[in-house]
Amino acid sequence: MHSTQHNTEQSTPQSVQTGQHNTSTGKLWNPNYLRVWSANFMLNFSFMVLTPLLPLYLSEEFGANKDQIGMVLSGYALTALLIRPFSGFIVDSFPRKAVLLLCYFIFAMLFGGYLIAGSLAAFFVVRTLHGAPMGATTVANSTVAIDVLPSDRRAEGIGYYGLSNNLATAISPTIGLFVYHWWGNYKAIFLVAMFTAVLGFLINSTLSLRPRNPQPGQKAERRPLSLDRFLLLEGWREFICMTCYAFSYGVISTYLAIYGKEKLGITAGTGLFFALLSTGLILSRLVGARSLREGRVVENAGHGVLISLFGYLLFAAVHHPIGYYGAALIIGLGNGHMFPAFQTMFINLAPNSQRGTANSTLLTAWDLGVGLGIIVGGVVAEWLSYSAAFWSGWIVNALGTLLFFLITRQHFLRKRLR
């Protein structure tokens, strides 16, 4: 299957247009891939270094209650969700490096808004605006990463690309807590985030990509604007599954710090939680890389969703540090198998000219799920309890797991293009 794909891409003009620069080398860790990998690490580090501390910041600085925290923090997910489909279209239609650098620059500069936001309303505006460049940058960066991978190692490369997210998630909360306790000032964390994002932008500015100019006569073959230029309609089943999985993650990742502090007496355990989560993600990606390389995408996805489902069950059912930390490792193991497999599924359901659209569709599903999880989790926690909020996350995750095994898995095997 891989050799057929490789030859097809080398012989068609479309491969030139979509940026297939390294298909003939077979080298996974080529210089461009290392650059976008590192820039993605910086992107996620700068964002995640803030995330675990923001609920506490809003509560202590502005006196926000649970409902207000949920609404403020969900703002970025809303704008990221709205921008994702357009990001995929833009990335597929314009020079990718230019799009990537513009989006990354705006993303980095908006960290300055957190420093000057003097009210809860102002912070909400900045946080909401920040979602747009965050959403667009992740689409552009991951699409460039896929472009510069050799075709016969693309699924494996997608898995390793996710390690940059996982490593950032593993160390950023700990560093954020260290910075806060050392300086006793949230603004120092905002400065660290801004500096890291600027560094990522500078790394991406050194990318060396061939222009994706259309071939002679190709302009007339371009398809008219339609919904499938913005969302990969063939992947709607996978979209629903991913939304369900992201819902659970949105509930837990947003409220675990306050839950741990108020209910379990864990005052500084957020960093360890994310470190264990990322350890699971890293281990499963390393273990799963071989099976992805061998084309066992559906098996990886199935194992991942089942493991994650058990992890969310443990978190919801066991109100004890064992359940708190044990769930982190198990969820990480599951998501590390599931996410790169689903990303490969989206890519394999799309023609080469719609890689940006496929990526944006996957990330749109994730943003939608996380946003819903933050909002619904906050409302349920406010009116019922944190336990009820975490159980709601598990139920939605279970529905996504059922959909995968009953419908989605068979659909992908019938419709995949590679």
Image (cartoon, rainbow, N blue to C red):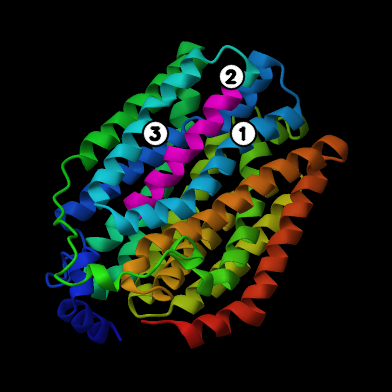
Which amino acid type corresponds to the residue marked 2 in the rendered image?
Answer: Ala
| Highlighted range, magenta | 122-142
Could you give the CA–CA distance between mark 1 and mark 3, rounded to whole angstroms? 16 Å
Query: Which of label 1 and label 3 is nearer to you?
Result: 3
Q: Is residue 83 left or right of residue 248?
A: left
In percent of width and height, residue 366 lies at 55, 54
Could you give the CA–CA distance between mark 2 and mark 1, rounded to whole angstroms? 13 Å
Q: Is residue 255 left or right of residue 82?
A: right
Which amino acid type corresponds to the residue marked 3 in the rendered image?
Answer: Phe
Q: Give the residue displayed 28% in from the left and 55% down from the top.
A: 144
Residue 73 bears which disc, if any?
1
In percent of width and height, residue 355 lies at 36, 65
Residue picked out by circle 2: 122
Q: Secondary structure at mark 3?
A: helix
Q: Sequence-wise, which precedes: disc 2 or disc 1?
A: 1
Residue picked out by circle 3: 107
